[in-house]
Image (cartoon, helix red, strand yellow):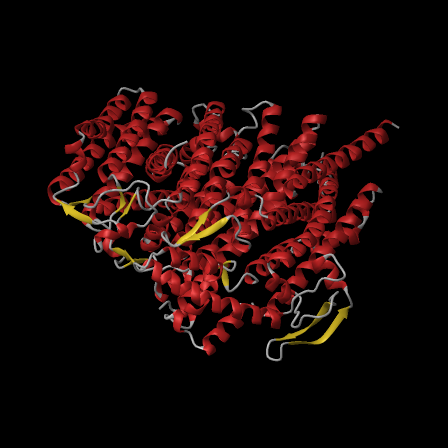
Amino acid sequence: MISESVVELSRWQFAITAMYHFLFVPLTLGLSFLLAIMESVYVMTGKQIYRDMTKFWGKLFGINFALGVTTGLTMEFQFGTNWAYYSHYVGDVFGAPLAIEGLVAFFLESTMIGLFFFGWDRLSKVQHLAVTWLVALGSNFSALWILIANGWMQNPVGAYFNFETMRMEMDSFAEVLLNPVAQVKFVHTVSAGYVTGAIFVLAVSSYFMLRNRDIPFARRSFAIASAFGLASAISVIVLGDESGYEVGEVQKVKLAAIEAEWDTHPAPAAFTVVGLPNEETMTTDYALKIPGALGLIATRSLDEEVTGIKDLVAHAEDRIRNGIVAYGLLEKLRNGEDTPENRAAFSKVSVDLGYGLLLKRYTQAVVDATEEQIKLAARDTIPQVAPMFWTFRVMVGAGFTMLLLFVLAFYYTAKRKAYQTRWLQWFALLSLPLPWIASEMGWFVAEFGRQPWAIGEILPTYVATSHLTETDLWMSLAGFIGLYTLFLVIEIYLMVKYIRKGPSALQTGRYHFEQNTATQGA
Amino acid sequence: MWYFAWILGVLLACSFGIINAMWLDAEEEQRADD
Amino acid sequence: MFDYETLRLVWWLLVGVLLIGFAIADGMDLGTAMMIPVLGKTDTERRVIINTIGPHWDGNQVWLITAGGAIFAAWPLVYATAFSGFYWAMLLVLFALFFRPVGFEYRSKKDSVAWRRNWDYALAVGSFVPSLVFGVAFGNLFLGVPFYFDEFTRPIYTGSFWALLNPFAIVCGLASVVMLALQGATWLQMRAGGEVQGRAQTMATLLGPVLTVLLAVAGAWLYYGIPGYEISSTVVGDAPSNPLSKTVTTTDNWFGNYTDYPILWTLVAASVALPLLTSLMAKAGKSGFAFTLSSLAIAAIILMTGFTLFPFVMPSSTDLASALTLWDATSSELTLEIMFWVALFFVPIILGYTLWGYYKMWRRIEPEFIEQNSVSNY
């Protein structure tokens, strides 16, 4: 029997290390393209200030990137160390995009990043520009393959269960690649990264403007970030909506939890803006609703229903009963009764095998599960509603706030007033945490909303762990938290140090702290 | 085909950024000439 | 194009290629970084050492990540069993590796003696520990690893972390450390200027014979003192991957393959001779040759290890049939085939731009260069 606390601790460890990793990833994704933009302008116009911009923002990029690499290593190791059964059960499908990520993307990004930092005097202008673009492309391709892997966890297409090897095996690589969930997740995630990069540049440039330092440097950075950010913010929101639509198609449970849809209502369903979801009574108290809106968003129609949680639980119960049959047949097949009849019978019900495995949390003898145990397992198929409901709304709120910021920033830049508009600069500076809050909330919705599954409707999280002890987990968790805290403190210290110095950190002699008059640079 | 949309979108967003910077520069130069 | 059996064999070779790529490329900067406090006395000298690998360590490290990913994709059972079984060894490697990206990137971003000294040690330890643990892990493969599979193929490890640190495995671990340090020393002799170059030469001259001795000790121990394993049932190369469908027995030692294919002794000869030749070249001041020979030595040593274990990847000491071999621990035929084409297409491209990077950055890093470009260097 797997210990409940080992599962809990493994989940905590994965959640903490993954969310920590994603503090650094979005900035890498976005800032790399911003560097490429700045350097492109430098190569096209030959103006020194754009070279300095590329170098200065590149320094901040490097400080962030180091921790992105560090924490990315953990992700590569952790499936094997802590989710061994998962690794065996789906490695045939899930391992492929991870390996391809290394070969196709990460090699490119990491090799080029060395040339980006050290190649300024060793490469021609155009060669160096190409290197910068390749860094950006490499990091984005990296995200592509990781999200193909993640998309498959949400919506496992192109694979079947092989009872002889006791695992999922791929039968269509194209389906894995073109998985609609992977596609929208990829575009939504990288756009969120671009927004992160743009907000970062906008906020730090605003800090320079508020301090009245290096204005030409700050204005240009601000202009680039506001345009790039505006385009990206629009795309995050459009694609987030598309993502919601895809979720409505393939992950009905997640959608119902996000929207606290307890019952199936006549179409089109109302959208609950805010309210207090109550797990006990399965109702949402004090709900503020917009009639018809959810039906429109989730189904893009007026006559399709959004299935409510109560109906989804009933549906899960049916599938668990099927899963029990599948599990029984699997045991027969693996214990010497490999007959054509058993194979045929198993292939009919094997899609529900995962539902049978949900019972493992309550009993080892799955085939003899009691009614009570089936009811408990069926209830497990719905993630907790309140956390889903709230994190989703925080993410959306942050997203629209940032969109507003970009619209204003772009408008005031176009009017050439951004550098005199103090309130806008304060707005940009104070918005600095928003993209990180939105990203973390978004991942929470995506992955907490996947529960109780490690692989959607295939492999319950509960059975996916390694054979470890509680002590192992407590110690490794402490190790991760300790080291990660230390690194984060150092990273923030260096970031602040370099942001305070501004472009003067490049020691070119052209910027604020290197001027005798100490008023303005360049 | 959202992958395709990404290629177009990212090119568009980058061009948007480049153009915005060059517009600002062009205007400053003009002002300096005046 | 290939049948399942051939693909399995090809993937065994490809994993070998990735491990050799890792040991040659990342081994070079692991070896270099572990000697920072030894070969660099002043801040400038230490920066000379770090900056020889500055543009390259990050790309090199991807060999490790890709090897890990490839094992996940091609040998999911090996990935699951080894990473979870060697839990603490793996975490130790991971925690140590953490200090490298941050160490390289942050070390020279603050002008403080204590700050820089601490990062120097962090880089050295962060490079030494993984080199040691990888060798220890390979040593334990020869001894067999205590694990079995339950009825649903869940890997269950029954050993402890401390049992991994047995004398034979420690000799293997030391050999691994010395092998990578030799690679780092020849690199530094070739690329570092000033005092560091001479110290690296001395180090490279010393380490070759040490490596040969360690390999000879490990080899003799393996020959006389450690039983081997062999598959005692018929091998079906295209059967579904299920380790429990075969039987395994122990043998006198691991040298059965050498009796069947005496040609393999050439690998042993190369593994013993190449480190010595490396040192001779280093002593003669021919650092380019020394580095090449050291890289060849690494390839020979890893191939020797692989062929000795063949067809085993991870034998089990407690439940012999659970042993993972290249025939029964792989992915499905489709996955192996897709991954084969991806690797065939992308590995040459990777080698191409990596070599371009080395070519563009090729120069001896002199102390004056560091002092004049203090801001832009690590």
Please say if C5 is above or below A208: above
Asked whether the viewer can see residue A496, the reply is yes
Taking the view exactly as shown, the residue that stands out farthest to the bottom is A281
Q: Is residue A272 left or right of residue A490?
A: right
In the image, residue A397 lies at what x, y percent? 71, 60
Pick out the residue farthest to the right: B34
Say which quadrant the N terminus of chain C sits in: top left
Q: Is residue A8 visible?
A: no
- Where residue B11 appears, as percent x and y from the top left, is 69, 36
- Out of C298 and A172, give the one closest to the viewer: A172
Q: Residue at x 50, y 61 (%)?
A: A453
In this picture, residue C308 sits left or right of residue A345: left
Which residue is at 27% across, 56% downward? C148
Spot occupied by residue C136 in the image (x, y as percentages of width and height)? 26, 46
Please, is residue A417 above or below residue B29 in the view?
below
Place of residue A25 in the rendered image (x, y in percent of width and height, measured from the top left): 56, 47
The residue at the point 44 percent across, 36 percent down is C57
Q: Nearer the viewer, residue C278 or B4?
A: B4
The residue at the far front in this view is: A341
Quarter where residue C125 is shown? top left
In the image: residue C209, left or right of residue A250: left
